[in-house]
Image: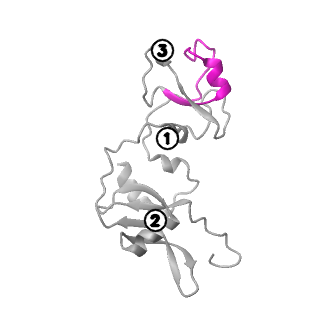
C-alpha cells in the first residue's frame, strides 16, 4: 500500500498492459506477474502506475505497461472463439432475457442439429432457463428475441471488462485497433 488511506493492491488482478518486443499489444498481466517479469529481466517497464510495492528495505514501482524483451507473436489478430470470450463479449449477460451473472451457458442461435455453426455470429451467452426454453429451435420459433445480434469482437475483449482505460495505454491500443 502507498499510504494508510489508499486501497490495498490486488496483486493477482490483471491490471498491467503487456506489449511484445515490437510494442504490439499482447494482453494483460497481473501486477505480481509483471513485477516478476521486470525484476527477472524478461521485460522492461515502459510506464509506471504511480503505486508501489514495499518490502522492508525496498520500494518497487508497480508497472502500468511492460514490454517483453523477446518477440512473442500475437496470432492473426483474431480473438479465440471460446466460452470465456463469448461471455466476455456479451458482458456476462443472457442475450435473451438480460439476466447477468457467471452461471451462464453458451447457446447456438441456429441449433447445431439445423446446421448452426460454431461461429461468433451464431453463439451467445444464455442463462440456463432461456437455453432450456429455446431448446432445439431458433429464437423466432421459440418466441424469443436477441438483445443484440452476435458479432465477432473488433476490440480486445479485456477492454470490455474494464471500467477505465489508463491514459498511458492509449497510444498502444490505438495502434492495436487500427
Image point 41% across, 69% down: which residue? Answer: 37
Q: Position of residue 155 (x, y in %)?
A: 44, 45
Query: Mark 1 touching mark 2, by CB under 8 A?
Result: no
Disc with the residue nearer the chain's start (3 vs 2) = 3
Q: Would residue 75 appear left or right of 133 to someone viewing this image?
A: left
Task: Name the residue carrying label 2.
Answer: 168
Is 50 covered by the magenta stretch? Answer: no
Q: Is 171 or 2 nearer to us in this picture?
A: 2
Residue pictured at 41% horizontal, 66% vertical: 66
Q: Position of residue 157 (x, y in %)?
A: 48, 46
**Which is more foreground, mark 3 or mark 2?**
3
Count of picture labels: 3
Determine which residue is flagged by label 3: 113
Residue 41, above or below 19: below
Q: Report how far apart the C-alphas of labels 1 and 2 lie in the structure.
A: 25 Å
Q: CA distance from mark 1 to mark 3?
A: 23 Å
Query: Do tag 3 and tag 2 residues touch (Cβ < 8 Å)?
Result: no
The residue range painted magenta reads 123-148
Amino acid at each position: 500500500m502507498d499510504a494508510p488511506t489508499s486501497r490495498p493492491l490486488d496483486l493477482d488482478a490483471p491490471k498491467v498492459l503487456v506489449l511484445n518486443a515490437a510494442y504490439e499489444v499482447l494482453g494483460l498481466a497481473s501486477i505480481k506477474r509483471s513485477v516478476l517479469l521486470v525484476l527477472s529481466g524478461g521485460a522492461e517497464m515502459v510506464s509506471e502506475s504511480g503505486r508501489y510495492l514495499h518490502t522492508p528495505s525496498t520500494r518497487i514501482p508497480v508497472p502500468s505497461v511492460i514490454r517483453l524483451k523477446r518477440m512473442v507473436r500475437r496470432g492473426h489478430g483474431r480473438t479465440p472463439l471460446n466460452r470465456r470470450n463469448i461471455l466476455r463479449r456479451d458482458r456476462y449477460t443472457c442475450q435473451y432475457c438480460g439476466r447477468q451473472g457467471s452461471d451462464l451457458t453458451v447457446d447456438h442461435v441456429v441449433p447445431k442439429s439445423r446446421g448452426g455453426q460454431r461461429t461468433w455470429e451464431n453463439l451467445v451467452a444464455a442463462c440456463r432457463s432461456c437455453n432450456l426454453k429455446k431448446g432445439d429451435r431458433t429464437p423466432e420459433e421459440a418466441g424469443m428475441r436477441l438483445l443484440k445480434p452476435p458479432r465477432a469482437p473488433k476490440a480486445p475483449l479485456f477492454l470490455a471488462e474494464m471500467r477505465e482505460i489508463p491514459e498511458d495505454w492509449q497510444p498502444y491500443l490505438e495502434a492495436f485497433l487500427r
